[in-house]
Amino acid sequence: EDSLRSFLASSGNYSAGDREKVLAVVGVHTELGSAARRAALRATWFPPNPEGVVSLEHGFGLSFRFVIRRTKDKEKMADLQKEVDMYHDFLFIDADEGTKPPEKMLAYFKAAYDMFHAEFYVKADDTIYLRPDRLAALLAKDRLHHRTYIGCMKKGPVVSDPNMKWYESSYGLLGNEYFMHASGSLYALSSEVVGAIATTNNDSLRMFDYEDVTIGSWMLAMNVNHEDNRAMCDSTCTPSSIAVWDSKTCSGSCNPIEKIKELHNTTLCSKSPTLPPEVEEEE
């Protein structure tokens, strides 16, 4: 369910059955207990209201939604519904609370592909600081490859000790090192790639313990072009940074709410030109 479409359809401004054409769908993945994070994003780089979502879609071709799953807890669901009724910026996916991250991601791509005719489908965490204008500029570039996987590419050791962090239960299938894959905080898949995923039987896709590794394994099987872009994982704001987050320092322990607000109050982060001055001069 797309809460924005439902809201617009109820006001007679939208046909809920249309598969909307956009440059990209940007699904910001969030959880029930993360209302404060969503508030921080709406107060900084995420559209603050339905009009803002529509305006950003018309201006940059990016359609933003908070991606979330429902809960059977009536009290939590009632609190979430109040937020839905106020902002209308949620995409509910077909996944329950026990769904593992890779399965949740598959549900997101299937839902987004069903609702949007996009050139790219983007997954983002609710802990990053994003420049929508720069993301749009990146995705709008001409590419030779129709099957594209964009993100901060990485490798790393496969952890086979169940007592250690990042233990991978299927380590026997992977060897000592993971294959190249994008960090899970922000990445984009082209339409042809998501179309293939969306029409595949769920049971035929292997699921590893972690989302980023699982997506990366599907990309290897599909023979996509891996596009490594370090501007999607800057640790500090630069004239060209697309997204800012510091996984090496924080690793889940930092306060993303305060960090996002702090970054937004920095001119270099929020008010610098879309393209660095030297690039604008060249054009």
Image (tube, rainbow, N blue to C red):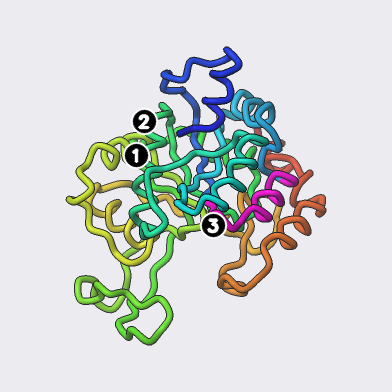
Task: Please say if 20 is above or below 280.
Answer: above
Q: Secondary structure at mark 2?
A: helix
Taking the spot 38% from the left edge, 49% from the top edge, the residue there is 95
Which quadrant is the N terminus positioned in? top left
Q: Which mark is residue 110?
A: 1
- Measure how far apart labels 3 and 1 are at the Cα level: 27 Å
Q: Counting other residues with Cα less than 10 Å from the Cα at mark 1, is it few (<14), some (14-19), or many (20 or more)?
A: many
Span of residues in magenta: 30-44
Q: Secondary structure at mark 3?
A: helix
Q: What residue would you read off at disc 3?
A: 230
Q: As shown in the figure, which amino acid type bears the numbered disc 1?
A: Lys
Q: What residue would you read off at disc 2?
A: 114
- Measure how far apart labels 3 and 2 are at the Cα level: 30 Å
| Residue 23 at least partly seen | yes
Point out the residue furthest to the left here: 204
Q: Which mark is residue 179?
A: none
Asked if residue 40 lies in the magenta stretch, the reply is yes
Q: As shown in the figure, which amino acid type bears the numbered disc 3?
A: Arg
Q: Secondary structure at mark 1?
A: helix
Q: Counting other residues with Cα less than 10 Å from the Cα at mark 3, is it few (<14), some (14-19), or many (20 or more)?
A: some
Q: Counting other residues with Cα less than 10 Å from the Cα at mark 2, is it few (<14), some (14-19), or many (20 or more)?
A: some
Q: Is residue 65 left or right of residue 95?
A: right
Q: As shown in the figure, which amino acid type bears the numbered disc 2?
A: Asp
Q: Is residue 249 left or right of residue 203?
A: right
Point out the residue furthest to the front here: 74
